[in-house]
Structure formats: C-alpha cells, structure tokens
Amino acid sequence: MYVCSSCGYEAPRWLGCCPDCGEWNTFEEQSHRVLSAADKAAAKPARVAAEAQTLSEVSETQETRATTGNEELDRVLGGGLVMGGVTLLGGDPGVGKSTLLMQVAAELSANRKVLYVSGEESVRQLKLRANRLAVKQDRLLVLAENSVENILSKCEALKPDVLIIDSIQTMATEESSGSPGSVSQVRQSAAAIIRYAKTTDTSVFLVGHVTKDGSLAGPRVLEHMVDTVLNFEGDRQHEYRLLRAVKNRFGSVNELGVFEMLKNGVFPVTNPSESLLSQRARGASGSVVFCAMQGSRPILCDLQALATRSFYNMPKRAVGGVDSGRVALLLAVMEKRAGKKLFDQDVYVSVAGGLELDDPAADLAVCLAVASSLENFQLPQTLCVMGEIGLCGEVRPIAQAERRVAECVRLGFTEILLPKPNLKNLSHIDGARLTGVDTLMQALAVVR
C-alpha cells in the first residue's frame, strides 16, 4: 500500500498529489499485513453502548492539576499538569526538549511516581545527562525501550502517575507492520499510549520530532489525538528558548513561557522584560520599547529599525519578529499620511530577543522606530510606545492597556505614549506621564 506521510491517507497505488490533504510527493510504500478472521476478532475491542443524557445530568468534577515545579511550563499548560492529559512537545533537534523533560521529571518524582521512557538513549546515557543537570535521581524511574507493548506492560506493573515518552517517532507496536517513525506506526503507537492514559488517569508527555519547515513529523491526526500541543523554539546560538501552546484543551493557547539555556539545564526566566531590555543599545536612533501582551503576561521588548539610503532599483525590506506585510502597510501609511520619504530607503525591522509579535499595538512603535532612524534622532530611554495605526493614519485604542502601563511603570518607564481613547479608562499613575495621541502625525510631533 501507499500511505501519505502528511495525513495518513492510504491508496493502492502511488499518487503524486494526496487527494485528502493536497500535499505533493508524500506517498510512501508500506507493506500491508492481511489479518485472518480470528486475528480481527481478537483485536476488535468490545463495544459498550453509551446512553444519551442532558448536560444538566452530567456530574461536574473539577479537573485535578499538579504543579510541575516549573513556573513557565505551568503557565503555558494553563496552571499545571492535568491528570489523564496527554501533552505533545515538539521542537528542533538540540533545542532542549529532553533536557526540559528530564528536569521536570526529577521535580515531579519528589511527590509522584514518574517513568521516563527513552527510545533514543540507553539508561547509561540518561544517567550521564542527569549527572550533568544535577537533578534528583533516587526516585526517578527510567526505561530504555521501543516496544509499546513492553512499555505498557511495565506501566501496568509500576502504575506511574506521569509517563514520559522520548520520542514517539521511535516507538513501534505489533499492531502495525511499518517501520518505526512511519505514519502507521506513529498513529498506532500514540493511540495505544493515549488509550492507556485515559483509562488510568496517567499524565503523559510525548516528545515529537519536527520536519524542515518546523511542523511536527508524522500524521496530522497525531495533533488531534492529544490534549495539548507545545512548541519549544529558539535559536541554538542564543540562550533564550520560547515555549508556546499550539493547542490546549485545558487552558489558553496565548500564553508564552520564556526559558534560558545554560550549561547545567533549561531554567525559567521569571522576569523576561528585564532580561530582554538588559542589553538595549544606549544613545542610538531607531530603538523604541514596546509592551506586548503574550496571553495574560505583559512583556517589554526592544523594537529596532534601520532606514538607510538604497542603492538598488528596488529598496530592500527585511523584517524579523513582526509580520512583513504589516510593516509594508505601515511604511505606506508613513509615506502617504506623514510625508516620510521611504521610496529610496532600505528598511530593516527587528525585535530583539527572538520574540514573534502578532500584536497590532506594535504599529506605533514600528513607525516611530523607522522615523527615528530615518531622521537620525534618539528616542528617550524612559519612553514606552504602544498603539494600533489605521490606513488613514489614526491611532486606534488597544486591549489591556492597564496591564501594559502597570508593567511599564514597574520597570521604571516614566513616559508612556498610547492612544488617547485609552486614557479614559486609566486613572492617574504616580511617577509616569501618560500622553495620548489621535494620529500618527501627533505621535511624531510628541517624540520630536
């Protein structure tokens, strides 16, 4: 048979384009094992008819959560680990997935029974990593195994509270004849582990590999099967790592966890604003501080821009950390509404620290940073800017302005530039001057 490596669609012959997901060149040949009638009858689970009932008849039971000992991970999970929940953790090779889970497993083992299963390393290699991380080892159970049936039989005997599988692509089950890492093996192995987690209320962490484009390897149905999908990202050349929730049935997907990679492990950054601003350039044009909202957490970041004379027929536009289409729109608004000549300028925009901003409140900060570099004037070091800009050059109100302003004041910023409509809901704040603007032209006049 031929199976699509993207969605798991099966076909009796090779196809160039998958009719289910539309991906090209994803069909792989796999051997198909024909089961006898006795095998099918033995493998067929017993079906129990479910009774329909109204929602008012359903008993309310509050979900039980357990802290992982890691503040940033608890934040992204929605408050802690849910008993019986299955979490899929994905990330690039070497980003620190196994390191993070080893530290979390050691913390959880103090009060709960934890089984760490590795399909990629031996128990001796796990011991070496635990020594390097200097974690507690006396109560942490480890197992080097690739067979799902053997793992589940060990779990039946040990009855762990938390099960960690590193990684799901190395697992193999007898129910599938494909090689480990194939679509059928990943799907069948994950289904068996998830079924065990739901019937025994065992919390499970699954480590997943990623492809070249950053998506999780294996069938897309894997992300639908689990309860939570976490993405651990970051440049290996930098010390900061970011943890985002792509899917979370028990919490918000807007939370962001910030970690710092050191030689002895991955540690949470409890105050990322101070860390991101600690190396901010002093006395340079094109730099402005912006307060972004990542879920319920306000984070101050350094937004930088560089505008320089272009020697190309088409000026270059390079953007990092902000949507490039949004930046192109803002440059057009500056040209049309504010009279800034950018048609012959190369413009570069970047967010220091590796943050990815999708907050429309960053519009005003981008425009002021570009204007500061274009006209070579410095913005005050105590200034923080936020506001959304429309096509007519108006500055529109932003969400959660009170929390943003409070974070700015806490970190010592005394001048805050924000939309004028937001001033109506803000009371007087000691030690800070709030300036409201209606248009982009007014904002440029204030900072000059």
Image (cartoon, rainbow, N blue to C red):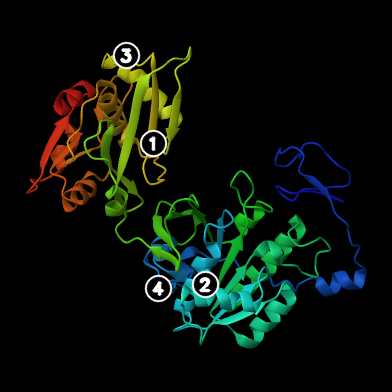
Q: Secondary structure at mark 2?
A: helix
Camera sees residue 256: yes
- For marks 2 and 4, the one nearer the N-term is 4
Figure check: 267 above or below 183: below
The disc label shown at residue 341, or none: 3
Which residue in the protein does label 1 denote? 350
Which residue in the protein does label 4 denote? 69
Q: Secondary structure at mark 3?
A: loop
Q: Position of residue 267 (x, y in %)?
A: 40, 65
Which residue in the protein does label 2 denote? 102
Gap between marks 1 and 3, in whole Å?
A: 20 Å
For badge 4, the amino acid type reads Gly
Figure check: 337 above or below 377: above
Q: Position of residue 346 (x, y in %)?
A: 40, 21
Q: Position of residue 297 (x, y in %)?
A: 31, 53
Name the front one of labels 4 and 1: 1
Gap between marks 2 and 4, in whole Å?
A: 12 Å
Of the pair 243 and 85, the residue shown nearer to us: 243
For badge 2, the amino acid type reads Met
Identify the image quadrant of residue 157.
Answer: bottom right
Q: Secondary structure at mark 1?
A: strand
